[in-house]
Image: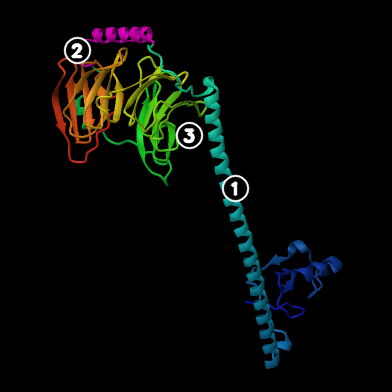
Amino acid sequence: ISLPYSVSNEVPEHPCVSPVSNQVFERRLIEKFIAENGVDPMNGQPLSEEQLIDIKVSHPIRPKAASATSIPAILKSLQDEWDAVMLHSFTLRQQLQTTRQELSHALYQHDAACRVIARLTKEVTAAREALATLKPQAGLVAPQTMPTSLPATGLQDKATVLTTERKKRGKTVPEELVRAEDLSKYRQVASHAGLHSASVPGILCMDLCPSDTNKVLTGGADKNVVVFDKKEEQIIATLKGHTKKVTSVIYHPSQSVVFSASPDSTIRVWSVTGGNCVQVVRAHEASVTGLSLHATGDYLLSSSEDQYWAFSDIQTGRVLTKVTDEAAGVALTCAQFHPDGLIFGTGTADSQIKIWDLKERTNVANFPGHSGPVTSIAFSENGYYLATGAQDSSVKLWDLRKLKNFKTIALDNNYEVRMSDRAVC
């Protein structure tokens, strides 16, 4: 509703009412009149600005000028508006073209920067590996010569202590072990995604930190090793250096150190706190298929498709011994230390489980029975039994004292068997 101004009879933009004369005025004009005269312009009675009362109205629509009442004037007005719209549209198209050019240039710069970063990252990795080769204390010590003996004293002492502790515990099942009936009640309580690259998906191996089970170690198809804190739900470290997928990982029981193996023929020792690779062990000429940490925490056992198993010092990266069964001439598929550390088992591509004496470096027993490549080996905590899994979708339990198989668990076809090095038979 438009209210005409009492004096000029025009529609005010900011209307207000005078309580003295009850007339509607344009606030700007009435304030100026009051400032000069101090009275209401309609009846001459005293009036101040504070007495004025604002009126809330919709924005008035002013009538067209008198020049727009004829048809030629209307046509000209429409032509002017059309020209203005076209000019505005042309300006917007120019701005859009300019923005597209700027975006294209920015994308080109981003792509070039990514290429430079990738090249520099590759050069830095190569430089670190070269430095590790040149400086034994910071990296790999190439196994130029193989020693004829192992550190037998330290290994024997550790084995004696572990064997004595197991005998003290006896043959009874530890009370802290979970019962079989309780296992069926286990349910998933959390799921953590995004640890590895989504473009190259797949977690191929995992281990828990023995001293803090909240820390989870994983190896992925994206060539990375990740240390994840499941309690805090955050990644502690992403360790990059392998050139192929990571198939084996181990968390050191007492140090902030982890180990990984890959088909790129290398074993890497990583510092979790430093987030970097401190050792690169090149004990094999083909894919590393198995990895196990000795009970002392100072040595690594590894197996490979090159048919060799190797025993290496994690502090120096030096390969202490490297042995193959020349008579068999077959690739090794997994490896695992016995709890006391003096013997260990390896699995082969032709379904054999071989038991080795570490000090003598000789094959002391064989367990045939599987019908596919052996994929996993795990010794019982008391050291008397051995569990093995193979691609024949079966799990076999062996008595190391009687050297025979006493239980076979057949699984569904194509069921893969994977056992952790911390598994208990």
Task: Decide if residue 176 is in sight here.
Answer: no
Query: Mark 1 touching mark 3, by CB under 8 A?
Result: no
Viewer-nearest residue: 415 or 119: 119
Report helix, strand or loop for mark 3.
Answer: loop
| Cα distance in 3D space between marks 2 and 3 | 44 Å
Tell me if mark 2 has few (under 14), some (14-19) or many (20+) residues whose alpha carbon lies within 10 angstroms of its own. few
Q: Position of residue 119 (x, y in %)?
A: 56, 42
**Segment tinted magenta in the rendering:** 151-174
Question: Is residue 102 within the magenta segment?
Answer: no
Which residue, as the protein is rendered here, is positioned at the far bottom? Answer: 71
Q: Position of residue 67 (x, y in %)?
A: 73, 88
Report helix, strand or loop for mark 2.
Answer: loop
The quarter of the picture where residue 78 lies is bottom right
Which label number is shown at residue 113?
Answer: 1
Which residue is pictured at 70% across the width and 87% down the height? Answer: 76
The residue pinned by badge 3 equals 241
Which residue is pictured at 17% across the width and 39% down the height? Answer: 412
Which residue, as the protein is rendered here, is positioned at the far front? Answer: 327
Amino acid of disc 1 = Ala
Q: Earlier in the sequence, mark 2 or mark 3?
A: 2
Residue 121 position (above or below residue 317): below
Amino acid of disc 2 = Lys
Magenta residues, dominant SS class = helix
Which quadrant of the figure contains the N terminus? bottom right
The residue pinned by badge 2 equals 171
In this image, 308 relative to 64: left or right?
A: left
Tell me if mark 1 has few (under 14), some (14-19) or many (20+) residues whose alpha carbon lies within 10 angstroms of its own. few
Amino acid of disc 3 = Gly
